[in-house]
C-alpha cells in the first residue's frame, strides 16, 4: 500500500500488482475495504438490488409491498430483505418501502428479479424502482 497526499487528505491506493490479485476490483480500491466487501458479499464480490415501492398513500404502498414479499424468490444464494420503510419514508408526497436483494456474484440477479416482478401486479399510483448494485441507499 502507498499513501498519496493531495489537497490536505490522504488517499490510500493499491499498487497495480495488488489490483490484479483481487478480481473485479476497480483500481485504487482500498484493500481493507475490498476485504470487508468480499467477506460481506457486497459488490464487486457479490450482487445487490434495491427495490423501492412507492405510492401516494401508505395503504397502497403497504399492500403492494406485502404482495411482493409473499412472492419473493426463495432460492439458494439469494436473500430478500424487507419490506421496510425506506430511509426517506416519504419523499415528494410519496410513501416508500424498500427491499434489498443480496446474491452471490454467480447468480443471474436480473433474471431472478424479472421473474419475481412479473408475478406481481401493482395497481393505481404504485411505482416500483429497481437499482442493481446501488451506489446509495437513500
Image: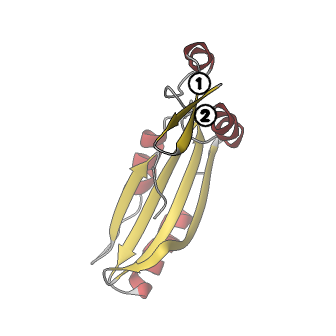
Q: Name the residue at 54% across, 27% down.
A: 25
Q: Name the residue at 31% across, 80% down.
A: 92
Look at the image and tell me in which quarter the C terminus lies: bottom left
Residue 37 image label: none
Residue at mark 2: 30
Secondary structure of the residue carrying tag 2 is loop
Look at the image and tell me in which quarter the N terminus lies: top right
Count of numbered circles on the image: 2
Q: Name the residue at 55% across, 69% down.
A: 83
Q: Is residue 92 left or right of residue 37?
A: left
Q: Is residue 119 left or right of residue 37?
A: left
Look at the picture and state if 118 lies above or below 109.
below
Residue at mark 1: 14
Of marks 2 and 1, which one's residue comes earlier in the chain? 1
In this view of the protein, which residue sits in the foreground, 71 or 35? 35
Q: Is residue 117 left or right of residue 56?
A: right
Q: Mark 2 and mark 1: span between their CA atoms?
A: 6 Å
In this view of the protein, which residue sits in the foreground, 75 or 127? 127
Amino acid at each position: 500500500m502507498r499513501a498519496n497526499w493531495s489537497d490536505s487528505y490522504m488517499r490510500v491506493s493499491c499498487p497495480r500488482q495488488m489490483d490484479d490479485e483481487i478480481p473485479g476490483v476497480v483500481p485504487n480500491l482500498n484493500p481493507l475495504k475490498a476485504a470487508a466487501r468480499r467477506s460481506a458479499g457486497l459488490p464487486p464480490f457479490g450482487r445487490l438490488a434495491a427495490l423501492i415501492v412507492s405510492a401516494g398513500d401508505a395503504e397502497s404502498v403497504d399492500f403492494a409491498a406485502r404482495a411482493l414479499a409473499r412472492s419473493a424468490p426463495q432460492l439458494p444464494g439469494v436473500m430478500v430483505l424487507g419490506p421496510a420503510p425506506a430511509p426517506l419514508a416519504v419523499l415528494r408526497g410519496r410513501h416508500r418501502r424498500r427491499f434489498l436483494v443480496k446474491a452471490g456474484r454467480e447468480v443471474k440477479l436480473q433474471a431472478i428479479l424479472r421473474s419475481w416482478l412479473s408475478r406481481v401486479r401493482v395497481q393505481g399510483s404504485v411505482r416500483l424502482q429497481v437499482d442493481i448494485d446501488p451506489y446509495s441507499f437513500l
